[in-house]
Image (cartoon, rainbow, N blue to C red):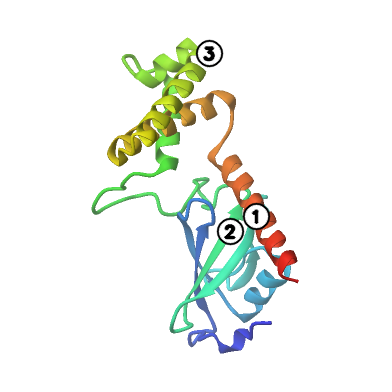
């Protein structure tokens, strides 16, 4: 059992906790914990913080239902800051947004699969004229499935030819069309991540059993 007294809490008995979505690795919020809230977090497997403004403990999701289930807690090299990876039940921010960090004021947001998925969802809902994605949704499931099949074949052909550049290009095409299919079928990225995570856990368990 980890001895939390080895952590370096500040003069007020607090330590910053950076909360990260375990699936997307997106920073959700920056909060603070004291020794008591950290113990509660580890006992319950749910994030519990110390509110500096109210000067009291608060279990995230206790009133909103947006609990954060802890996957792991890691401290930095100086043991004076924490990274808490979580599976969240809902928005992390009190404003109802997915994350407390939403306003980019320098540089660009960059690309993410989650961002692309949101764009694809938007094309289905808004039906933007001239959009290829909207065209696919308008044509329906059969058209989307046909494109997934065609792109799968293109990946196989490129890979068989051992053409890395072309294979990457075709995999990107396939990935895009699979995301369109997922949106059409009501499947989220979280659904797929959870399935992959469950397989990872099972695989680790099987390997451990083989070693014993």
- The structure residue drawn at horizontal position 65% and vertical position 55%, both measured from the top left corner, is 67
User: Which residue, given by chain and number where applicable, does mark 3 sit on?
Assistant: 142
- Alpha-carbon span between mark 1 and mark 2: 9 Å
Vertical order, 115 against 147 (above or below): below
Q: Mark 3 or mark 2: which is in front?
A: 3
Q: Which residue lies furthest to the left in this view?
A: 107
In the foreground, 103 or 137: 137
Mark 3 residue element: helix
User: Which residue, given by chain and number where applicable, does mark 2 sit on?
Assistant: 86
Q: Which residue lies furthest to the front in this view?
A: 161
- The structure residue drawn at horizontal position 39% and vertical position 44%, both measured from the top left corner, is 112
Mark 2 residue element: strand
- The structure residue drawn at horizontal position 59% and vertical position 66%, both measured from the top left corner, is 72
- Alpha-carbon span between mark 1 and mark 3: 38 Å
Vertical order, 13 against 48 (above or below): below
Q: Mark 1 or mark 3: which is in front?
A: 3
Question: How far across and down, in percent of the image, does residue 102 sit?
Answer: 39, 49
In the foreground, 35 or 187: 187
The answer to whether residue 172 of the structure is visible from this angle is: no
Q: In the image, is 130 to the left or to the right of 17? A: left
Vertical order, 127 against 206 (above or below): above
Q: Which of marks 1 and 3 is nearer the N terminus?
A: 1
In the foreground, 204 or 92: 204
User: Which residue, given by chain and number where applicable, does mark 1 sit on?
Assistant: 67
Question: How far across and down, in percent of the image, does residue 117 sit?
Answer: 45, 35
In the foreground, 28 or 186: 186
Picture quadrant where residue 45 is located: bottom right
């Amino acid at each position: 059992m980890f001895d939390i007294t080895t952590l370096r809490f500040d003069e007020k008995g607090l330590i910053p906790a950076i909360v990260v979505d375990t699936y997307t690795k997106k920073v959700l919020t920056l909060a603070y914990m004291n020794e008591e809230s950290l113990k509660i977090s580890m006992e319950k497997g749910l994030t519990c913080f110390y509110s500096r403004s109210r000067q009291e403990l608060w279990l995230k999701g206790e009133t909103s239902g947006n609990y954060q289930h802890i996957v792991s807690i890691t401290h930095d090299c100086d043991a004076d800051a924490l990274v808490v990876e979580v599976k969240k039940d809902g928005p992390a921010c009190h404003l109802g947004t997915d994350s407390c960090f939403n306003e980019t004021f320098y540089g660009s947001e960059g690309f993410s699969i989650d961002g692309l998925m949101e764009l694809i969802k938007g094309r289905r809902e808004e039906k933007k004229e001239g959009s290829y994605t909207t065209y696919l949704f308008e044509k329906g499931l059969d058209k989307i499935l046909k494109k997934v099949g065609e792109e799968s074949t293109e990946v196989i052909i490129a890979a068989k030819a051992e053409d890395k550049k072309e294979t990457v290009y075709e995999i990107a095409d396939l990935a895009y069309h699979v995301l369109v299919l997922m949106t059409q079928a009501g499947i989220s990225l979280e659904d797929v991540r959870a399935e992959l995570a469950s397989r990872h856990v099972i695989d680790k368990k099987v390997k451990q059993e083989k070693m014993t």
